[in-house]
Amino acid sequence: MIQVGDVVVSWDVLREKFICDLEACKGQCCIEGDAGAPVELDEIEKLEEVLPVIWDDLSPQAREIIEKQGVVYTDIEGDLVTSIVNNKDCVFTCYDEKGCCYCAIEKAYRSGKTNFYKPVSCHLYPIRVGNYGVYKAVNYNRWDICKAAILLGQRENMPVFRFLKEPLVRKFGVEWYDELELVVNELKQQNLL
């Protein structure tokens, strides 16, 4: 692990290769797993504000869940996560005619209907950020459904941290990301990466 400011970054984030391949995976990360996506406290209001914009893109089951329990819940580990449908789909998912899953929030953002992209944890995936009091930990989350993304990343020689530059800057700031790049360059010069 390396440290950049108060953030500890795992070697895997620097070494592993990754580029999302939506054509191959069909957005499985939004519909598989045992809980919704992690949500930061200040994102709840943003999720509620975007609801009128995306409401018609959500499934009837998702709308019912949101009306009953809201946009988030606390999972068995005590984490705040997006609500899910049938212990599976995130309530913010929508599908295209090919059965590919998309985030309704991101779809609205890309068409200029909202200034909220989506929860930062979704934007950062496959990176997960853990909070440990005085420091944060940035880790690479391996998941079988992302095999195509790993292969594409290897083919294009794209490290996880570079593929996720935009969400890392969103989470930690430009100065932090620039410092990360400096550390990576130093590690390369020392043949440690």
Image (cartoon, helix red, strand yellow):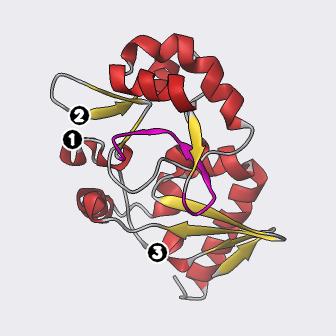
Q: Does the magenta stretch include residue 77?
A: yes
Amino acid identity at mark 2: Cys
In contact (CB < 8 Å): disc 1 and disc 2: yes
Left or right position of 157 against 164: left
**186 vs 169: above or below:** below
Which residue is under mark 2?
100
Which residue is under mark 1?
23
- Magenta stretch? 76-87
Which residue is under mark 3?
15
The answer to whether residue 184 is visible is yes
**Which residue is at 23% across, 34% downward?**
100
Q: Residue 73, image x and y in percent?
A: 58, 43
**Which residue is at 61% across, 28% downward?**
47
107 vs 91, nearest the viewer: 91
Q: Residue 25, image x and y in percent?
A: 23, 48
**74 vs 84: above or below:** below
**95 vs 111: above or below:** below
